[in-house]
Image (cartoon, rainbow, N blue to C red):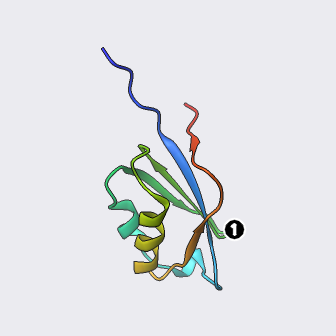
Amino acid sequence: MTAASPLLRSKYRATEGGCVSCAGDLAPVQALPGVKEVDALASGLVLVTHDGTVTDDAVVQAAHKSGLPLVPAGPARPVRG
């Protein structure tokens, strides 16, 4: 029996006047393979919980499709259970 892979959480910050609450639906980010949860915070941060197969580039491109310019805000960190 193998242990389940731990989930990771990546943090992204809105740029160029990007407004998380104005971005509308972040469904393109949620739809990325490996993404488990997307949390948009009023502070301009977007937290993406994933299985470790999701790249920063994929998240940034998907968010851009929703009208939200993002940049990575640090390395992915393990989600504590």
Q: Residue at x 31, y 54 (%)?
A: 33
Q: Is residue 5 left or right of residue 70?
A: left
* Extreme-right residue of the structure: 43
Residue 69: percent from left, percent from top: 54, 78
Q: Residue at x 55, y 53 (%)?
A: 10
Instruction: Say how many tags the image has.
Output: 1
In what quadrant of the picture does the N terminus appear?
A: top left
> Which residue was labeled with disc 1?
43
Residue 77: percent from left, percent from top: 59, 43
Say which of 59 and 22 sits in front: 59
Q: Residue at x 37, y 68 (%)?
A: 27
Q: Residue at x 64, y 85 (%)?
A: 16
Image height of 16 relative to 27, above or below: below
Q: Which amino acid is tagged 1?
A: Ser
Image height of 23 relative to 27, above or below: below
Residue 71: percent from left, percent from top: 59, 69
The crowd level at tag 1 (other Cα within 10 Å; few <14, some 14-19, many 20+) is few
In what quadrant of the picture does the C terminus appear?
A: top right
